[in-house]
Image (cartoon, helix red, strand yellow):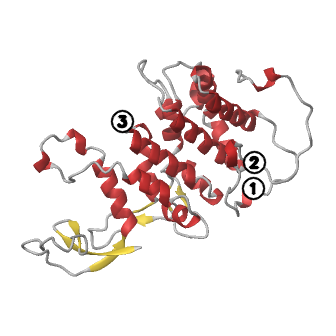
Amino acid sequence: MKIAVIPHEGSLYPVNSRSGSCTAPVPYPAGEEKEVPALPLLVEAFVQGATMGEITDLSKRPRKAELHFLASVFANMSVSPTGRNVFLSPQPFQLAQQESGDLRYPLSKIVAFTEHKDTIRRKGVASTLKNCSFNAKGHKAILSPESEQITVRPSKTTAPGIAALPYILLPLAGPEEFDLDDQEKLLPELQFLPPDKKREADASIRLTLIETLLLLCHTRWGRDYQRAHGVYEIIREAHMHDKNEKVQEHMERLVQLLKGEEPKVASLDDDEDEDVEGDLQMGSSPSPEKAKQPEEEEEDDEDFRIEEI
């Protein structure tokens, strides 16, 4: 979707943003009207709105509202495959400039708000991230650091990685100290957290973040990346402190995927040709392999406890 705008004093004036009863601005912005993608403008407004509550002088606010509700709009958009593709397609984010080569994934602009003080913003961003994780072709882009240029098929356009893993794990992390071996696995953002670090208080948001990690286990690459970057270590500590049974159950499923043996049969998930639709229905964990695996003998309940390995 595109909207008509006029570049004006380093910003963009949306031509059709006024209601029928609203008078045109005086003086009217000079410049040539052009069409630009709408989503980057909404994302930029959402990012700017995050700090508007800190500005007490309303006349100095670049935005009149904090726009937390846009997080729910993004979550609703990303429910459909088309919406997910938009968040995982590189977009220009310097639209006021004549020539803009700065392409970013729209999802990368909002993932940092998983620890924002507003619950609506946190919940909407977490849901958007989870919905986008249904697209298996986007897993490398979602997890890879910004230093890497990633494409999401079928597009051939590259953009910096979204680096979402720290923002998924930070709400689940506490002030616990890790031994040296475990500490080295953690991403820099998760090392040496302050002693007053609090975990996410909303159980539904914690569950959404765990479900996101489960979806990102759909590919072998995603599982290996999580193993190498301390996801198990964070989840092990979170499981010890979480009192919500449903959250604990999903954590245990995640650990089974991360610490269990990989199947010896050839896996097709590296093709990443399908969405992970149906893998998280009714609270079930996503199946990491499409191939049939041999049945295993039932074990005691102790086998499902999260223990340091």
| Residue position marked by numbered label 3 in the rendering | 117
Q: Nearer the viewer, mark 2 or mark 3?
A: 3
In terms of secondary structure, where does tag 3 sit?
loop
Residue 71 in the image, given as x and y percentages of width and height? 41, 51
Residue 97 in the image, given as x and y percentages of width and height? 27, 69
Q: Which amino acid does label 2 sit on?
A: Pro
- Marks 2/1 in contact by CB < 8 Å: the verdict is yes
In-image side of 228 versus 262 (left or right): left
The front one of 132 and 96 is 132
The C terminus lies in which quarter of the figure?
top right
Instruction: Count residues near mark 2 (Cα–Cα under 10 Å), then give few for <14, some for 14-19, many for 20+.
Output: many
Q: Which residue is drawn at 53% across and 37% down?
A: 204
Q: Can residue 1 be seen in this view?
A: yes
| Residue position marked by numbered label 2 in the rendering | 288
The front one of 259 and 120 is 120
Instruction: First in sequence, mark 3 or 1: give its number.
Output: 3
Q: Residue at x 73, y 48 (%)?
A: 220
Instruction: First in sequence, mark 2 or 1: give its number.
Output: 1
- For this orientation, the residue located farthest to the bottom is 32
| Residue position marked by numbered label 1 in the rendering | 269
Q: Which amino acid does label 1 sit on?
A: Asp
- For this orientation, the residue located farthest to the front is 21
In terms of secondary structure, where does tag 1 sit?
helix
Looking at the image, residue 123 lies above or below residue 152: above
Q: Residue at x 24, y 80 (%)?
A: 33
Quadrant of res 246: top right
The front one of 121 and 225 is 121
Residue 114 in the image, given as x and y percentages of width and height? 44, 41
